[in-house]
Amino acid sequence: MDTSNIKKAIETDIQSLGCEVWGLELFGRKSNQTLRVYIDKEDGISVEDCEVVSKHVSKVLDVENDFSENYILEVSSPGLDRKFFYEDQYQDYLGEELKVSFFDTDNKKTVRGVLSQVTPHGIQINLEQETQEIPFSSIIQANLII
């Protein structure tokens, strides 16, 4: 299973339900993987939204994507401390505080600061004493801080 192929397979169906795919995570052993689908919409996600999307996604994956492996499907909202999955998600959070883990030369580094700019190549975070430019290709994980 590949998350980009999964996203392509389920995105239109999820949009038809009034939601958007916020992100996908695939983890666990190949014989028993978990696929976590994060969904969002402007007025927030309810348990009922997750239930409906779960049923639709399950049908789409079982029919269209020909999954031969066993998998567990979880559908969830991104939550308040949402993880960023795609480059285009950052723009809506300018001025918000983020926690970003990334590779800086050879070391892993984690910073907390205010998202001040999004460019085609990365993000800029204002720290207490400096500004940190982080290329998208270096980001390991970024989360909103509430």
Image (cartoon, helix red, strand yellow):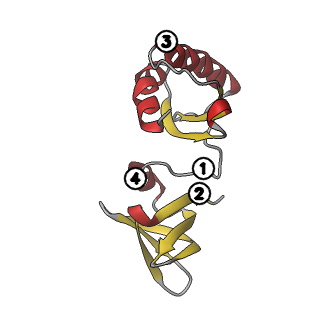
Give the CA separation, mark 1 to mark 3: 30 Å
Q: Earlier in the sequence, mark 1 or mark 2?
A: 1
- Secondary element under disc 1, as helix, strand or loop, is loop
Q: 140 left or right of 81?
A: left
The residue to which callout 3 is attached is: 63
Q: 60 left or right of 28?
A: left
* Nearest the eye: 7 or 32: 32
Please name the amino acid that badge 3 sits on.
Val
Please name the amino acid that badge 4 sits on.
Glu
For the residues bearing labels 1 and 2, Cβ distance under 8 angstroms: yes
Q: Position of residue 111 (x, y in %)?
A: 58, 73
Quarter of the C terminus within the rendering: bottom right
Q: Earlier in the sequence, mark 2 or mark 4?
A: 4
Give the CA separation, mark 1 to mark 4: 14 Å
The label nearer to you, 2 versus 3, is: 3
The residue to which callout 4 is attached is: 87
Residue 3 shows in the view: yes
Q: 129 left or right of 145?
A: left
Please name the amino acid that badge 2 sits on.
Leu
The label nearer to you, 1 versus 3, is: 3
Outermost residue toward the bottom?
129
On residue 144, the disc is 2
Q: Earlier in the sequence, mark 1 or mark 4?
A: 1
On residue 82, the disc is 1
From this view, report whether residue 103 is shown above or below residue 3.
below
Give the CA separation, mark 2 to mark 4: 14 Å
